[in-house]
Image (spheres, helix red, strand yellow):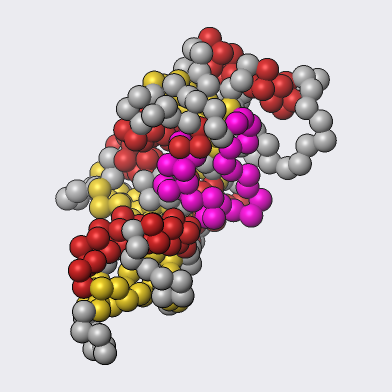
Amino acid sequence: MATKIRHITTFLNQWAPPGTKMDYDNVGLLVGDPDAEVTNVITCLDITDAVVDEAIAANAELIVAHHPLIFSKIGSINPTNEQGKIIYKLIKNDISLLVAHTNLDAALDGVSFVLANMLGLDNLKFLTKNYEISKKISLVSAVENSDSMVKLLNYYSAENVHHYSVESREADLRCFEAIIDKHNLPALKKGLKKEGLIKDGALQVTDLASTSKNFGMGVIGDYPEEGVGKEEFLHLVSQALNVQAIRFSGDVERIKKVAVCGGAGVFLKNKAIAKGADAFVTADIKYHEYFTEQEDFLLVDVGHYESEFPVAEALKNEISEAFDDLSVTVTQVVTNPMQVYVSDHKPQSIQTS
């Protein structure tokens, strides 16, 4: 069966559900026909005119990007401005655009996990988990359906299914419980009905007191044994992310525990400190945000593009693994609009009379 764009959309929605995006964000299929067939995909961080030209040259039918091209409503589409030019060119060349942005920031193995892996951190966990999207479900079914029920629930469950027998007037019944993220509930109900495992009204859904384990913001991990020294750490970050210059504040002798957040994540600084991080790597830090009262703590700004561009490779790998009939490549276009000049001249101290 030929792969269609909606198949890839469904796959990405399972990894990074649209329901976890920020309110201001715009994700999903922004341009294109969901029923169009696709054989060639390009992944990228930013969608630019040069990336579209690359897709045209490669005969790609789909671009999967992290940053949205369209954030707010647009009144017209014509090639008289940069956004209109890109949309116009996409449509004219029958190329679709699929976006996973803040929902991919919040996903397990999403943007911050990719960054943490690039820095060689172990024992990765979410820095903060504040997504209350999981639900507890319970239902009753016949004992002979137990294996089928457990298999289906485990497919959609956020955790392994816990099931047990309960007293019943009908001894051949068993009660099942599972933790399900709410975006999976419609598909679960459909699957249960298709397999004849549930009747209308037999499924009970209740809220959980705790948040989901599958979604959060930022990541914290550590280096083995005694960790690394400050200079070694900055060099490691520079090499891993191909960064020419790194802005940072603070000082620390050894770095063992590190928090990261791809993109503009300085709002998690205090959370990183509270979790015992020796360093926090993120981007887009403003001047006054570099100040911190915490001793032995390093606040590091590697740049927005630099902290997130590895996710294009992760998108390629995940899509390739899920759809072995597709050709998936990462853009060769460097879409970072910021350039850095590094001078050999050492700045002098300010002299006062």
The answer to which of 203 and 342 lies nearer the viewer is 203
User: What residue do we see at 35% from left, 63% from top?
Assistant: 196
| Residue 4: % across, % down | 48, 31
Q: Could you tell me which residue is drawn at 35 percent across and 53 percent down? A: 220
14 within the magenta span: yes
Quadrant holding the N terminus: top left
Q: Looking at the figure, which quarter contains the C terminus? A: top right
Quarter assignment of residue 93: top right
Q: Which residues are magenta?
A: 8-33
Q: Is residue 255 above or below residue 306?
A: below
* Left or right: 310 in relation to 291: left
On the picture, is 1 further left or further right than 47?
left
Image position, residue 105 (x, y; %): 48, 47
The residue lying toward the viewer, choosing from 312 and 258, is 312
Point out residue 349 in the picture as x, y percentages from the top left corner: 56, 35
What residue is drawn where x is 82% and y is 35%? 75
